[in-house]
Image (spheres, grey):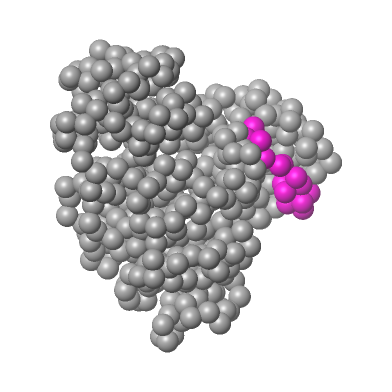
């Protein structure tokens, strides 16, 4: 366990996880320096919240590292930021909030990573474990920062972890690590898929033979780890497998074998649409089985799971036109999955901030299913150039204009879906605000 009492600790980035880390460190009597480059933060409010802390808002100054013994970095701060690069150059220990928290927690951790589906699987697994009577913390990159679990009494900790968070782990060791998939994303931070995947793979860095790696057999970039991880491998995929631990779908059920035991989990009543959600259910069920949950409890929890906001969420039907909010689709692969799960004809609203990925995977599903793509935001010109010929394309600056245009053109039997394939930060605080505004616009039609 890391000792923080009396230690000079700098927290870089004061979003939700940074403030949670700072609050925990303050409770353990660390000497705090709090920094953030955003100019919309109020130093007086921070001083009131963290009395005695040194607070620096604005451009980073590496001289602030003088005397610092530990740096805790928020996931949104890139590794080449001056304070993080400076800490590394000086040999100052550098960790993230989940690493800090994990050193003060004793309950087994189930950690979920992947490009898409993390939040769904995290919430799904949490509900399964709670249905099994386990006192379960659910959070991490989703919802509550992990440091908020410190001091609580939990049977399990279910934690969504992003590649950004995994960059700064040291001893973080999940009892169950779940790796869902890997596709183009965050190329504004990573040089390419290999570098992005390497960050994800750190999830298994500290596991041993007593732990579990839940791996997607259908994703070659994920399944290759089956040969290199030190943990036990539990594979999930759409074809039956002969591994010692495997799960696959078969006519309304999930069949599995695990350490010589065979069984099945009913999918009757499972309501989430799309092949990708069957994959998500397999991953959550595999983790629950590895944590000794009975298959009947898993089936009941899957049946009760209704999905998360802004993830292929039905908003309303107006004059025979269905409106779907998939604002959480912040990368191309997520938008492709959404298109594949919907019945045509579709009017797609997409766009936002370009993340440096390839839009080509959208061409085939757009050609098959879409009557129109309405492109918005900062990336609309780049997307139009990449998608020309896939379907009819129109462009508008704002979401409001796109909804108005879609409402005018949609006919009975059509589906209008917001699935942006881009981040939201050109016009919105986050994907949730984008989805909330979309839903408000649709409900006002």
Of the 4 image quadrants, the one containing the C terminus is top right
Instruction: Determine if residue 267 is in view.
Output: no
Q: Which residues are magenta?
A: 354-369
The residue at the point 21 percent across, 31 percent down is: 7
Q: Which residue is more in the foreground, 292 or 81? A: 81
Compared across the picture, whether 169 is left or right of 153 comes to: right
> Magenta stretch containing residue 364, yes or no?
yes
- Residue 12 location, x and y as percent? 37, 27
Q: Main secondary structure of the magenta part?
A: helix
Residue 280 higher or lower than 239, as above or below: above
Q: Which residue is more in the foreground, 195 or 22? A: 195
Give the quarter of the image for residue 356: top right
The residue at the point 24 percent across, 44 percent down is: 2
Number of callouts: 0
Residue 10 higher or lower than 371, as above or below: above
The residue at the point 17 percent across, 31 percent down is: 6
- Residue 53 location, x and y as percent? 22, 20
């Amino acid at each position: 366990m890391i000792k923080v009492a009396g230690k000079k600790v700098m927290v870089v980035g004061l979003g939700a996880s940074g403030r949670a880390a700072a609050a925990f460190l303050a409770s353990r009597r660390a000497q705090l320096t709090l920094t953030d480059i955003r100019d919309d933060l109020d130093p007086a409010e921070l001083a009131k919240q963290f009395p005695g802390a040194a607070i620096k808002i604005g451009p980073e100054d590496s001289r602030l590292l003088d005397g610092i013994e530990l740096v805790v970095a928020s996931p949104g701060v890139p590794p080449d930021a001056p304070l993080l690069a400076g800490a590394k150059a000086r040999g100052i220990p550098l960790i993230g909030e989940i690493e800090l928290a994990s050193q003060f927690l004793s309950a087994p951790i189930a950690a979920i990573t992947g490009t898409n589906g993390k939040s769904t699987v995290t919430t799904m697994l949490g509900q399964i474990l709670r249905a099994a009577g386990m006192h379960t913390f659910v959070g991490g990159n989703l919802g509550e920062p992990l440091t908020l679990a410190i001091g609580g009494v939990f049977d399990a900790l279910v934690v969504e972890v992003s590649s950004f968070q995994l960059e700064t782990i040291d001893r973080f060791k999940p009892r169950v690590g779940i790796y869902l998939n890997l596709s183009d994303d965050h190329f504004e931070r990573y040089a390419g898929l290999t570098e992005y995947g390497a960050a994800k793979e750190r999830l298994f860095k500290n596991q041993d033979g007593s732990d579990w790696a839940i791996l997607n057999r259908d994703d070659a970039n994920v399944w290759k780890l089956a040969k290199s991880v030190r943990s036990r491998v539990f594979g999930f995929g759409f074809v039956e497998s002969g591994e010692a631990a495997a799960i696959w779908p078969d006519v309304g059920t999930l069949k599995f074998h695990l350490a010589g035991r065979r069984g099945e989990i009913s999918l009757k009543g499972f309501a989430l649409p799309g092949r990708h959600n069957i994959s998500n259910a397999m991953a959550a069920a595999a983790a629950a089985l590895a944590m000794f949950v009975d298959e009947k409890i898993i089936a009941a929890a899957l049946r009760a799971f209704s999905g998360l906001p802004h993830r292929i969420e039905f908003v309303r039907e107006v004059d025979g036109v269905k409106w779907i909010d998939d604002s959480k689709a912040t990368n191309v692969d997520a938008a492709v999955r959404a298109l594949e799960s919907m019945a045509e004809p579709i009017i797609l609203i997409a766009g936002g901030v370009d993340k440096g990925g390839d839009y080509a995977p959208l061409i085939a599903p757009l050609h098959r299913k879409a009557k129109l793509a309405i492109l918005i935001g900062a990336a609309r010109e780049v997307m139009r150039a990449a998608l020309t010929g896939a379907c009819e394309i129109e462009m508008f600056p704002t979401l409001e204009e796109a909804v108005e245009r879609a409402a005018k053109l949609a006919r009975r039997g059509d589906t209008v879906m917001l699935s942006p394939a881009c981040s939201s930060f050109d016009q919105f605080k986050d994907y949730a605000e984008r989805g909330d505004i979309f839903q408000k616009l649709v409900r006002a039609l």
